[in-house]
Amino acid sequence: MAELHIVTAEYPPQPGGVSDYVRGVAAGLAAAGERVHVWCPPAAEVASEDAGVEVHRELGRISRADLRRMGALLDAFPAPRRLLVQWVPHAYGFRAMNLGFCLWVRERAARGDRVEIMVHEPFLAFGGSARQGVVAAVHRAMTVVLLGAAERVWVSTPAWAERWRKYRLGRTVPFEWTPIPSNVPVVEDADGAAAVRSRYAPAGGRLIGHFGTYRANVTELLEPILVGALEGGPGRAALLLGRGGERFRDEVVGRHPALAGRVHSPGALSSDELSRHLAACDLLVQPYPDGVNGRQTSLAACLEHGRAVVTTEGASTEGVWRESGAVAMARVGDAEAAVGLVDRLLADDAERARLGAAAERLYDERFHLRHTIAALTRES
């Protein structure tokens, strides 16, 4: 039986996309016959663990002493150990500049461990404040160190491979794209979805959804689309799903009081309830500042649920989105075009159904967790 050690700064019960992703991958690998060890920071709450996954909450504050202790514990396992590092540069502490962690990873490779990196986020962009420039420079130094240790790099979108390749410094390091799967399993409950719809949608009206975490760079794109779409017809309501939805609802209604009673957010939901709420929506509006791409968990959930999606095309958008015809896209920042897409789709039941079917098919063919598991077990 193969053995894999996943190193991550985020793991349940800690919330977040990376946390959910790692748990799903760990459970999937265990179900495929791998012996999986997850190395992560401690948690204030006790989380349930999946069969075949052993969780070691030994990362501590990811200090030098913590890493020495964890290294000694890793040494107790048979060599060579296979380490899969989940990389989000700001997640490892030390004000997003934990170069010591990267040096530790390189040391593990020097000791004979097989190191692979899963890049969820590459590095901070230059620009803005002087501190941002310093952090961006350190992130690139961290990238060089990690690429000096890695046998293989997995990326959540091909755009990250393009950004990282220039820092290989002559080394041959293969890159492979493994899109992020949904973390909201589909619940087949038509009656439950209908109950959600009757709660929020006007009688005979349309329900426009959004699923996300409502970061400022997304909401500045989302608000004009939602407002324009709601103003396009009195029989329309908006449903804001995900953490931060209630705050954003209050902000939108505060700026557009005429929409009070038509913008809803149910707050925190269980996975099953979230699935029913997604299924209740006629379509979802999912703008992204860098364009739709394969690293967006929220978008993957919309696809798996077979929902029609209006999204944005930008610098990081892969060709598969246009080739598949699975989403309707406007250029990033073109709210008027996005509202036009919403209007047309709400008026065309057949096209919404076609988009939903294409979305579900694309998810199954490219995004489903089994593709990530197949890729990782192929390399074991």
Image (cartoon, rainbow, N blue to C red):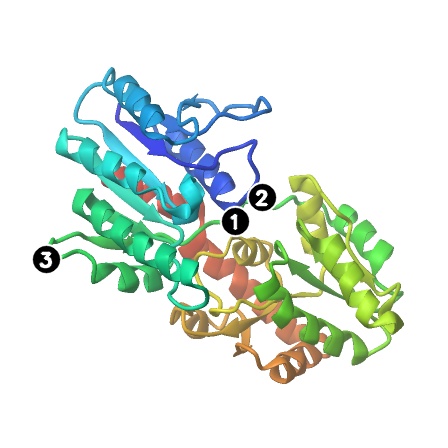
Query: Who is closer to the viewer here, 204 or 225?
Result: 225
Residue to which mark 2 is pinned: 185
Residue 335 sits in quarter: bottom right
Q: Does residue 98 appear left or right of residue 231 in this picture? A: left
Measured from the top left, where is residue 277 in percent x and y? 72, 51
Residue to which mark 1 is pinned: 182
Residue 189 sits in quarter: top right
Q: Is residue 195 above or below residue 132?
A: above
- SS under mark 2: loop
Of label 1 and label 3, which has the lower sequence position? 3
The amino acid at mark 3 is Gly
Instruction: Tell me the distance, in whole angstroms, between the alpha carbons under discs 1 and 3.
Output: 35 Å
Residue to which mark 3 is pinned: 170
**CA neighbours of label 3 inside 10 A, class few (<14), some (14 to 19), many (20+):** few
Task: Give the quadrant of the C terminus.
Answer: top left
The amino acid at mark 2 is Pro
Q: Does residue 258 appear left or right of residue 277 in this picture? A: right
Residue at (42%, 58%) from the top-left corner?
A: 131
Most distant residue in the top direction: 76
**CA neighbours of label 2 inside 10 A, class few (<14), some (14 to 19), many (20+):** few
Measured from the top left, where is residue 278 in percent x and y? 68, 54
Q: Is residue 9 above or below residue 203?
A: above
Marks 2,1: beta carbons within 8 A = yes
Task: Give the quadrant of the N terminus.
Answer: top left
- SS under mark 1: loop
**CA neighbours of label 1 inside 10 A, class few (<14), some (14 to 19), many (20+):** many
Nearest to the eye among marks 1 and 3: give it: 3
Query: Who is closer to the viewer here, 57 or 346?
Result: 57
The amino acid at mark 1 is Ser
Residue at (58%, 21%) from the top-left corner?
A: 46
